[in-house]
Image (cartoon, rainbow, N blue to C red):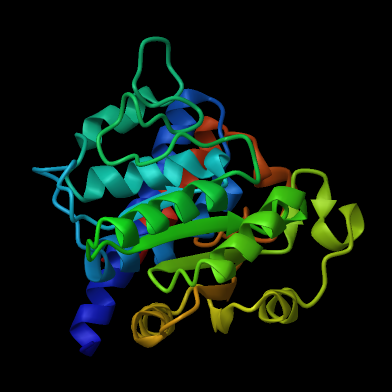
Amino acid sequence: MTKEETRELQRIAQRIRLGIVKSIAAAGSGHPGGSLSVADIMATLYFREMKIDSKNPTWPDRDRFVMSKGHAAPALYATLAEAGFIPKEELATLRKFGSRLQGHPSMRHVPGVEMSTGSLGQGLSAANGMAIAAKLDKRPTRVYVILGDGEAQEGQIWEASMTSVHRKLDNLMAFFDYNGLQIDGKITDVKSFTEPAAKWRAFGWHVLEIDGHDIEAIYAACEEARATKGKPTMVVAHTIKGKGVPFMENVVDWHGKAPSEEQAEDAVSHLEASLS
């Protein structure tokens, strides 16, 4: 990847962050913190790594993406808008009555949404099914999933993790959004969760640890995952909750509330300045 390609992905990530902030501000509710933390991963996946076609969203050989932590729907919607699956203007309808853009993503209504999520802990199981189906159908499809660190306290995640390894799903790549905060506080205070990389290695995954805001590191992880055979890849991505909006960064209160009009203007100004 050239430096200009890296810079362009960084700009896309910031535009995704703008979409997140504007849509949540327009809705008056939503989850900005964990949406902002995954913007760099989303930009790299959708604009460098994944085989997708916004003009043909049901293309059988497309790659699949599952936002397991479904409350980060604003990040998914902003990415889909940036990629041309939905109009950017539609982001302003987030959570409004009659809108396709519900508080959690629905595969029934939004082009490009592969799995309806929101009940935490279930996304990896769905991603397993997609990866198994691709192998049975002998398709080149790869499956990508983002997990929340608080979400990983759910037991179903670990049952699914065993299945991923047992089925040798080397066409499956997961990102663990390790921002350290969940709705009730630090993840270590809510339910002690230490050494996630060691946990997934113990389950048999190929595990990488990266800075989840480093575009080059994210793409290098994707390249390594594609080259890894016989086992799935888990990327422990160290991130900052609320990344890109200074007053939201590492503040647990921004897990699930919308900014005021003044705060939204401040956030938008800061993000727009980063694009100039």
Q: Position of residue 49 (x, y in %)?
A: 27, 70
Q: Residue at x 25, y 35 (%)?
A: 111
Q: Answer above or below: position of 176 versus 81.
A: below
Q: Is residue 30 left or right of residue 178?
A: left
Q: How many marks?
A: 0
Q: Position of residue 71 (x, y in %)?
A: 56, 39
- As rendered, which of 117 and 89 lies closer to the eye? 117
Q: Position of residue 219 (x, y in %)?
A: 35, 79
Q: Is residue 154 left or right of residue 248?
A: right
- As rendered, which of 46 and 264 lies closer to the eye? 46
- Residue 25 can be seen, yes or no: yes
- As rendered, which of 105 and 114 lies closer to the eye? 114
Q: Residue at x 35, y 23 (%)?
A: 93
Q: Which quarter of the image is occupied by the N terminus?
A: bottom left
- As rendered, which of 270 and 150 lies closer to the eye? 150
Q: Quadrant of residue 90?
A: top left
Q: Which quarter of the image is occupied by the C terminus?
A: bottom left
Q: Quadrant of residue 162?
A: bottom right
Q: Quadrant of residue 97?
A: top left
- Residue 273 can be seen, yes or no: no
- The residue sitting at the left extreme is 55
Q: Position of residue 114 (x, y in %)?
A: 35, 42
Q: Answer above or below: position of 254 versus 150.
A: above
Q: Is residue 5 left or right of residue 30?
A: left
Q: Is residue 11 left or right of residue 5?
A: right
- The residue sitting at the top extreme is 97
- The residue sitting at the front extreme is 136
Q: Residue at x 50, y 78 (%)?
A: 231
